[in-house]
Amino acid sequence: MTDSHTSKQLEARTKSTAVKSGAVAGFPIFLGYLPIAVAYGVLATQSGLSTYETTLMSVLVFAGAAQFMAANMFAQGAMFLQIVIATFVLNFRHFVMSMSFMNRVHSLPLRWKFGLSLGLTDETFAVSSLHADEVKKENSTYFYLSLILVAYFSWVSGSFLGAILGEALPPTLSESMGIALYAMFIGLLIPSVKKEWRIGLIALTAMVLNFYFIEVIELAQGWAIVLATILGSLLGIPLLKEEKS
């Protein structure tokens, strides 16, 4: 028996095995997404969105930070265009992640690459990167699809549960959930700042700009967030060095 034949046997697997492997790989994301999605659901209903609108946003957008920001901007009376632009800027990194993912799974059919890229988040992208060898195995598409669907189901179902809770909880208790927005962004920021202090400087600059636009220029809060996000992101071009592989 040749080594190549042995290798092919090791890489062979059924669709159900690939789905199971993807679900196992995505289960930590499921557990991590659920409480944050519930917090988003409560916050969104507190912001004035209905249960249907809150859940539909998770179904269509599937981007935690952007949805928290959109719900907060909605509560502040921001215009639809301001929310769309701010969401686009915040999620622009998804283009880079999608291109990297599609390059890694270049052997898959285009329809699979396109469909799977739509389900990428920071977490599913990171886990799929850790399982880069999956693409060499049979039915690898079902592995990635299962991984993404587990995360997607957790986010959508958690949002729905949070929306139900948001409508049932007393107003004083549901209002306290607003702290979840700031806690989530701080939780996302601190690990990055510990690796690279310049990211903290960019975040601080964006915060100061947002304060300046609102308090000094008296710009609408929606446009202040958009401009502060864009200018803060542009500051990252000269400050952050290109990562070396």
Image (spheres, rainbow, N blue to C red):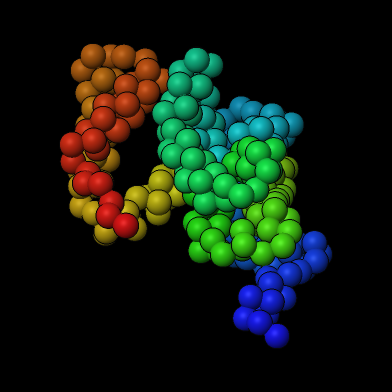
| Vertical placement of residue 159 versus 134, above or below | above
Left or right for 214, reference 226: left
Q: Is residue 164 left or right of residue 222?
A: right
* Quarter in which the C terminus is drawn: bottom left
Camera sees residue 236: yes
Image coordinates for residue 51, horizontal then vertical, percent: 72, 34
Query: Quick one: 88 or 3, which is closer to the camera?
Result: 3
Q: In the rendered view, does 137 fall on the left or right side of 90?
A: right
Residue 5 position (above or below residue 66): below
Q: Residue at x 27, y 55 (%)?
A: 244
Determine whether 218 is above or below 152 in the image: above
Q: Position of residue 64 (x, y in %)?
A: 54, 42
Q: Nearer the viewer, residue 187 or 150?
A: 150
Residue sitting at the far front: 2
Q: Nearer the viewer, residue 29 or 166?
A: 29
Is residue 39 something one can see in this rendering?
Answer: no
How many circles with numbers are drawn on the protein? 0
At 65% across and 39% down in the image, what residue appears? 110
Residue 116's x, y, as percent? 64, 44
At x 37% / y 18%, what residue is drawn? 223
What is the quadrant of the N terminus in the image? Answer: bottom right
Q: Is residue 203 left or right of residue 16?
A: left
What residue is drawn where x is 65% and y is 48%? Answer: 108
